[in-house]
Image (cartoon, helix red, strand yellow):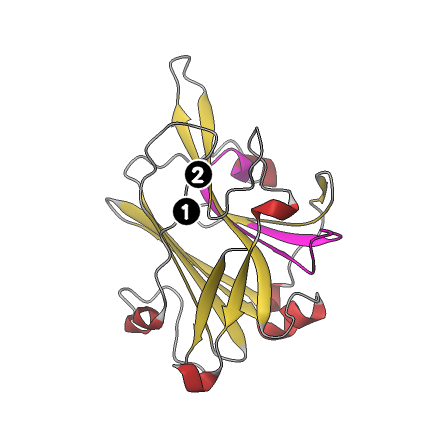
Amino acid sequence: MKTYTVNCIGKNTLTLGLANNAIWENAIVLTDFCSPWEDVEINKIEFRALWDLDTIYFSFRVFDDQIHIDKTDHTKASIANSDRVEIFMRSDASLDPYYCLEIDPTPRIMDFIAKPHKVFDYNWNWPNKDLKVKSTINKDYFEVEIAISIVSLKAFNLIKDNTIEAGIFRAKYTQKGNEAFEPTWITWVNPETETPNFHIASSFGVLNLASPQNI
């Protein structure tokens, strides 16, 4: 499985939404993304993660000057038709259950709990006190930052031996000739499927939480 090391930082040193926050320089920059199902050029995506024993932080910087946001309504279905970033987390390869966060650039949150074979419960929400999200839209890119409490991850059995099994994804919507917007599905881990599918065990990698002495 692919792995990514989440470096450890001091408590209360990272503030979401702070422009050019130097703390993010402590993170390893992950740019290894692909769209296995389409022969298209992928705009650069920079993923970063850090943690401080109480909270894990994620940052997506997506280089895109033509962002599509479906503003039909304020439901989760509208988010599902918009450009967005996604992170899924699971207890184990059984995917029973796994937890999904999909966030558009505004940032609207589509969070849900899922079971195998795309059984989704959209009525489920990550506890508000344990999830914070900020975003910025710039000329050439948008950025989404996420903070999740370690307490909640442990409550959902998502941390084992300082590792988290996670899928890291992006949906890019592009207008086609018939004026409909169609998605390009982008992933860190190639699940080796014939058609796009993030909701499968082979689409996950491992986030290794570094101990404090390793920073």
- Tags 2 and 1 in contact by the CB under 8 Å rule? yes
Give the residues drawn in magenta, as a range: 79-101
From this view, report whether residue 178 is shown above or below residue 89.
Answer: above
Residue shown at 28%/72% (left/top)? 22
Measured Cα–Cα span from mark 2 to mark 1: 7 Å
Mark 1: secondary structure: loop
Quadrant into which the C terminus falls: bottom left
Q: Amino acid at mark 1?
A: Pro
Q: In front: 98, or 190?
A: 190
* Numbered mark located on residue 105 in the image: 1
* Numbered mark located on residue 83 in the image: 2
Around disc 2, counting alpha carbons within 10 Å, would you say few (fewer than 14), some (14 to 19), or many (20 or more)?
many
Where residue 178 appears, as percent x and y from the top left, is: 42, 12
Where residue 121 appears, as percent x and y from the top left, is: 73, 45
**Farthest residue in the left direction?**
139
Residue 123 seen anywhere in this rendered image of the structure: yes
Residue 80 among those drawn in magenta:
yes
